[in-house]
Amino acid sequence: MILDSRNKIKMNLLNIENLNIFFKTDKGTHPIHAVRDLSFHVNAGEMLGVVGESGSGKSITNLALLGILPETAIVKADEMFFMQQNLQGLSELNWRNIRGKEISMIFQDPMTALNPFLSVEYQLTETIFTHQNISRKEAINRAIELLTQVGIASPKERLKAYPFELSGGMAQRVMIAMAISSSPKLLIADEPTTALDVTIQKQILVLLKNLQEKNNMAVILVTHDLGLVAEYSDRIQVMYAGEKVEEGITQDIIMHPTHPYTAGLLSSRPGLSSGLPKSVLPSIHGIVPAFHERPEGCQFHPRCSFVQEDCKSSAFRNPCLHPLIQESIA
Amino acid sequence: MSILKVENLHKSYPIKKLFKETKLLNALTDINFHLDRKETLGIVGESGCGKSTLAKVLTLLEPKTSGELSLLGKKYEEYRETDFHSKIQMVFQDPYQSLNPRKKAIDIIADPLIINSQLNRQEREEKVLAMMNKVGLREDFKERYPHHFSGGQRQRLGIARALMLNPEILILDEPVSALDVSIQAQVLNLLLELQNEFSLSYLFISHDLSVIQHMSDRILVMYLGRIVEYGPRNKVFENPLHPYTKILLESAPSVNKKRESATIISGELPSALNLPKGCAFQSRCPLVKESCKQEVPKLKSVDGRSVACFEI
Amino acid sequence: MKIFFNELFTELKKNKGALIGMFVIILATIIAILAPLLAPYDPAKIFSESLRLPPSTQFLLGTDDLGRDLLSRLMYGSRISLSVGLCVVVLSLCTGTFLGVIAGFYGGFIDRLIMRLTDLIMSLPSILFAIVIVAVLGPGIMNAIIAVSIVAIPNFTRIIRAQVMVEKNKQYIYAAKLFGASNFRIMFVEILPNCMAPLIVQASLGFSDGILNCAALGFLGLGAQAPMPEWGTMLSDARSFIESSPLMVTLPGLCILVIVLSFNLLGDGLRDALDPRLKKQN
C-alpha cells in the first residue's frame, strides 16, 4: 500500500495478469486472438486512460471486465482480481453482484443505450431498485439527488422526460447518473463523448473528473483521442492490435513516449504541436491489421520506422525491444 | 478573383405538423463568404450549426431559399448541369456509406466519366488507374468491392471519384472524422498534396478544431445557422474574439494544455425551432447583456476579421 | 454480384430445409423439362378400355376416369405449374419492383397514389380478388396468370419501396447526384442492386403463392381448362371419385403440396441467409 499526498489509501482495485481473449469463428479452425497477454491494473480512485484505434481490443477488454462477452468468447488469464475477488469463473449470480454495482459502464451512444419507450424516472429508479432495497418514494428522491449530482437542471421535470426529449449531452448525463447510482468503485467509460459536440464533451469529462475525485471512484476512460486522456487521466495505457504497447503516468507518456506507435500517434496529431499549418504531417504508414492478418512478432513492426530483425521474431513479447528512450522512466 | 462567392444565403425548411401552424426551421441565415483559388476555407461548428446544410446547398443537393451563389464569376443559375458538376465536387464523411457496396472500385471511380464524357472503356480505365495511383491505391485493387478496403482506403476511393472530373472546388465534409487516428494524418497529407498538384480550392467542414487549424487558410465559425466569426486562421486561432469561438477553442482537447485554466461553457444548444429573440448564443454566453436579447448582432469588421457580437 | 451469390450459397448450405427445398425444385424442373422423354405416354392419350385403374406395371400410378395415364399427366403438370409460377413471379416482380422503386424514390403524390392502389389490392383476400379479375377477363390459363400476378404485385412493391427509402438517403446516392447521374440511373443502377436480398426472398415465396393460387383457380374451373394436365384442374375433375379411386385425388394434391412447401422452405432459408440482423448473431 502506498500513501499519496492527500493521505488517501491507494491500492490495486483491479489487477489483470496476462489476459487473453479468443473468439471462436464459424470455420472453427483458428479462433481469433483478439486480446493478447494484457496485464494492467487500476488503482482505487484514479483515472486510467486507455487509448487505441479500432481493433486494438480496448472495448473487448471492457466487456470481459463486466462478464458480458458473447458466448463465442474464450477468456484466459493468469490473474483477474477486482477488490481481492477473482473474476474468473464467477457464476452469473455473483457477476450480478459486481456488474452495475461495483463496476459500472457508460457507452459511446447514450441515445441507443437508453430504452426509448421508458421514462427517465422509470429507468433510473429501476437501476436503483436492483441494488438497493428501498421504497419507491426514497428511490425517486435518490434519483433526483443523482440527477442533481450529474448537473441536470430542474431534475424533477427531467424525471418525467423520455429519452427522445433529451439532447445527447443530457442523455449521457442520465447514463452517468444510472451508472453511479450504486456508488461503484470502478466506472468504465467507453468512448463516452465520441458522439457529442466538443463543448458538451468538455462538460461531460469535467463531470466525470469531479465524480472520480469526489467519490474516490476509479474511472477507465477508453478513447481514441490522445488529447482527451492527456487532459484528464492520471495514467495512460496505449493499446495496439490487441496488445498493450505502453503504459505510464500521463505527463511521461505525452512528453516522452518510448514506443514508436505512441510517438507516431502524438506527432501525427494536427494542431499546435506539429509544426506549421498546411505542412506535411508526420504520419504512420500502413493500416491497422485486421484480426486474421495479424503479423508474427511485434504487432506494430510492419508500420514501424525503427523496425529491426528481432521485432519480427515470433518470440517477441511486449514491451518494445528498441524503445525511443533507452532508460525506463518509471 | 474569388472562385466561389456566397451572398445573403438563406435556407429554411418548413416543418409541417398536423393541426399546427407550419413553422420555418432556419438552417442557414445571412451567410456571406467567398473562397479564393488554391485556398482552404475551414468551416467549424457543432452539430446543428448548418455546416452540412451549407455543403448540400452549395452542391445543389438541396435548393437554396434565397440569396446569390456564384462560381467563377458566373451565377449558379447560368450553368448547364454538366458544367456545374465538373466544377464543384464533394468528399463525404462516412467512407462506409458513401460508396455503393455493390460496385467494384474501378466502376465507382469511373462512374463520373461514364456519365459526363464520351471516352471508351479503355480510355476510362487508363484515367481511373492514373487517378488510383495519385491517391495512393494500388492498381490491383481495381476489381475489389468497397468492403474489402479499410476506412482510409475507402476515403481515398471517395477522393479519387470526386477528382475524376477535374473540379475547381472540393467540398470536404468531415473527411477524416470517421477514420482511425493513425490514418487521419495520411489522408490529410494526401489532401494537401492534391491541393498543390491540381490547384484545388477546399471548403473544409469539420468539428475537429485541430484538423481545421492545420488545413485552413481562413476560418468560418458557425453557430445555429449563422456566421459568428470569419477571418484568417491566425487571427481566429490566436486571438478569438467571439465568446463562442473562445469557448470552442478552449473545449478542444489537446495534448499540451492545462485543464485547470479553461472555463466550461454551460447549457446546451437551443432547439433551432424555438430560437430565442436576439442573439442565438445568449443562453450560453458568459458576456450576455440585455441588448443581446433584443436584437441579432450583425457581422462587423474587427481586427482583420468579422465578428457578430455586441460586446466586441 | 458474384461474391454476393457465393456468400449466399455458403449461408444457405447450413440450412437443411432450404437444401431439401432446393433439391426438390431442381428435381421438379428436370422432370418438367424432360417430360416428353420421361413420361411413358402422351398425357392426352385415352385408353378407353382402362378407366380408373389402380397402379400396375403398365400404368405405374394408374389411370384417370377417361383412361389417361396419371403419371404422364402429373409429369406434364409440373411443366404447367412451374411455368405458371415463373410467369407469375416475372410479371409481378417486374411490375411490383418498378412501382416500388418509383414510389420510394419520388415520394409525395406518386408514392401515395401507388401505395393506395396496393392497399386496395391487399384489402381483399388474394384468391377472392383473383377470382374477381378472372371473372372479368374470362376463364383460361393466361387470364389466371394475369390475375394471380396482379394480386402478387403489392408484396414486391412494399418491400422494394421500404428498401429504396433507406438506400436513397445514403451518401453514395448524393455522390451519384453530384456527378450528374440521372434519376433513372440512380434508381435502377445505383439503388436497385442494393435491394436484391429481400427481392430474392420474396421471389421465392411468390413462386409458391403463384402456383398455389393458379391451382386454386384451376380447381374452381377458372384457370386451366379441361384437357390440360394442370394439377388444380386434375384435382377438381377427380374429386367425385375420391372414394372409389383415392389416388386420383391424392397425387395431384400431393404434388401441389410438395412443390409449394419446397419453395417456402427455400424462401425461408434465403431470408435467414440474407437477413443481416440474423447474420450478425452467428
Image (cartoon, coloured by chain):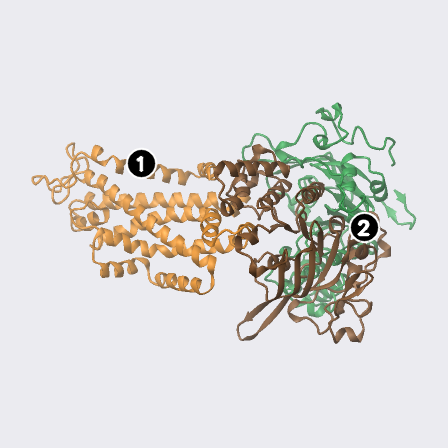
Chain colours: A green, B brown, C orange
Q: Is residue B50 visible?
A: no
Instruction: Check the picture and name the quadrant holding the N terminus of chain B.
Output: bottom right
* Number of callouts: 2
Q: Is residue A304 left or right of residue A290?
A: right
Tell me where residue C162 appears, x and y as whole percent: 47, 56
Residue at 78%, 56% (x, y): give it. B232
- Residue nearest the viewer, comparing C149 with C103: C103
Q: Is residue C31 left or right of residue A3?
A: left
Same-subunit check for callouts 2 and 1:
no
Q: Chain of mark 1?
A: C
- Residue nearest the viewer, comparing C184 with C50: C184
User: Looking at numbered disc 2 in the image, what kind of residue is underneath it?
Assistant: Tyr
Tell me where residue C87 appears, x and y as whole percent: 30, 48
Residue that numbered label 2 is attached to: A232
Q: Is residue B170 left or right of residue C80?
A: right
Which quadrant of the view contains residue A313? top right
Q: CA distance from mark 2 to mark 1?
A: 68 Å
Disc 2 on helix, strand or loop? helix
Residue B24 vertical placement versus A261 (above, below): below
> Would you say the residues marked 2 and 1 are in contact, meaning their CB atoms lie under 8 Å apart?
no
User: Looking at numbered disc 1 in the image, what kind of residue is underneath it?
Assistant: Leu
Residue C216 vertical placement versus C50 (above, below): below
- Residue nearest the viewer, comparing A93 with C15: C15
Residue that numbered label 1 is attached to: C27
Tell me where residue C269 appears, x and y as whole percent: 43, 43
Tell me where residue C205 appears, x and y as whole percent: 37, 48
Which quadrant of the view contains residue A19? top right
Residue at 43%, 63% (x, y): give it. C110
Q: Is residue C269 left or right of residue A133?
A: left
Q: Chain of mark 2?
A: A
